[in-house]
């Protein structure tokens, strides 16, 4: 199974690496990290890099496309770049599954793939997703036709396990979960706005909103 | 807070990127990816790279050291490399916390930091950890003095959230969990040998054992 993970400067690493390691652990997927230009890809923290081994022109099809997200407002660069949007639309024509993690759905929406569709994104970006003509929903993994969107950052692991189950069977997916020892035991139960303390949710919402109104730093 | 994440060829990306994105999301940590030689670091899948921005000689202290794991038998290169072990011992003298994810604890043990200590590793490497003079335990995050070891691959996220709580407070850790939307919903409950189907556990144990007996491919 051919998996293309799109990279771009300002990306959140875990959005890409969560799904990557799920697909890699199947031993049945050829995963390619793809960007407009190959080479080092700066992370949103400005404290490290991922690496794109392929340029858009070198990858013309995929069974699964993954568009990871990023810290606001870094998605703006991809949303406003016609070459990126064209590549996504072209790959989408060839996929069995077109997917996003976190704010990656904003980029899918900008590419015109989620008009009037139900999708999710990071909880802090629901209004922006809605303003693009997409209907936000609070589920963690949302399937609409062949498009699957996942919620914030870490949700890409859950989404990829679901895709492996659909494509390669439940046993393979359970095996991958076991290899990755994905038996989550966070010290707190604060991973969604419904579960976290209300004051904390509002503080972080405010900070994300401030970031969103800036210009991309990358 | 200064965090050094050690990289080496053959590493499992999520072991490093899980903790990285937790520390990065605090906005209070300076994270450095460090390797024997800086530059591209091949992943265990041979399908991508991480990037070391610093060489061992450029990083001489850290508040938190993270030694990620890898697919067997890739840890052998680090376990047999005196320069790597010396660097770990030296940084360990400066840390508040010395940590590992997955089979990274084999490397800490090879460096002499876990003799007679209780620690964890990937469930498939308990016997190897024991053969090095360390006492394996099945908890997901194990603290022994200032050394904290985590179980397989994805457990580094839980460990890093715990470290953030200890160092920067529970509210900061809850906020990071919310930013990463770490509200896990795997489609199955198969993430540990106690929970996965017994036949699957034995199949994967056998495959990991085969890998462990090979020579490193990197």
Image (cartoon, coloured by chain):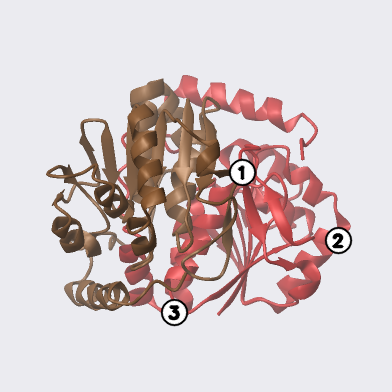
Chain colours: A brown, B red
Residue B120 picture location, percent across and down: 59, 50
Q: Chain of mark 3?
A: B
Q: Which residue is mark 3?
A: B168
Left/right of residue B164 with respect to residue B209 in the rendered view: left
Q: CA distance from mark 1 to mark 3?
A: 33 Å
In the depicted structure, whether residue B134 falls above or below residue A123: above
Task: Say which of B141 and A174 sits in front.
Answer: A174
Q: Residue at x 53, y 35 (%)?
A: A31
Give the foreground label among 1 and 3.
1
Q: CA distance from mark 3 to mark 2?
A: 32 Å
Give the foreground label among 1 and 2.
1
In which quadrant will I find the C terminus of chain B?
top right
Q: Residue at x 72, y 48 (%)?
A: B9
Q: Residues within 10 Å of mark 1 (few under 14, many from 20)?
A: some
Task: Say which of B131 and A58 sits in front.
Answer: A58
Q: CA distance from mark 1 to mark 2?
A: 25 Å
Residue A201 picture location, percent across and down: 22, 71
Q: Residue at x 49, y 42 (%)?
A: A20
Q: Chain of mark 2?
A: B
Residue A93 picture location, percent across and down: 33, 30
Q: Are marks 1 and 3 on the same chain?
A: yes
Q: Which mark is residue A24?
A: none
The answer to whether any part of residue A95 appears in the image is no
Q: Residues within 10 Å of mark 3 (few under 14, many from 20)?
A: some
Left/right of residue B153 with respect to residue A94 in the rendered view: right
Q: Which residue is mark 1?
A: B48
Q: Which residue is mark 2?
A: B83
Left/right of residue A216 with respect to residue B102 in the rendered view: left
First in sequence: mark 1 vs mark 2: 1
In the depicted structure, whether residue A23 falls above or below residue B4: above
Q: Chain of mark 1?
A: B
Residue at the limit of the structure toward the right, as seen here: B82
């Amino acid at each position: 199974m051919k998996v293309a993970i799109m990279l771009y400067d300002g990306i959140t690493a875990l959005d890409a690496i969560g799904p990557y390691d799920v697909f890699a652990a199947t031993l049945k997927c050829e995963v390619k990290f793809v960007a407009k230009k190959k080479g080092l890809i700066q992370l949103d923290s400005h404290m490290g890099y991922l690496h794109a081994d392929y340029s858009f022109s070198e990858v013309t099809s995929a069974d699964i496309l993954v568009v990871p997200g990023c810290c606001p407002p870094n998605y703006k660069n991809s949303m406003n770049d016609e070459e990126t949007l064209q590549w996504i639309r072209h790959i989408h024509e060839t996929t069995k599954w077109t997917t996003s993690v976190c704010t990656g759905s904003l980029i899918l929406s900008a590419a015109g793939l989620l008009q009037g569709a139900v999708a999710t994104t990071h909880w802090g970006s629901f209004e922006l997703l809605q303003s693009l003509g997409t209907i936000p929903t609070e589920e963690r993994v949302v399937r609409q036709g062949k498009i699957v969107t996942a919620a914030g950052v870490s949700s890409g692991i859950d989404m990829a396990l679901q895709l492996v189950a659909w494509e390669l069977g439940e046993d393979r997916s359970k095996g991958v979960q076991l290899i990755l020892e994905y038996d989550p035991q966070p010290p707190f139960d604060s991973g969604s706005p419904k579960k976290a303390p209300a004051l904390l949710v509002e503080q972080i919402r405010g900070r994300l909103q401030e970031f969103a109104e800036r210009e991309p730093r990358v």
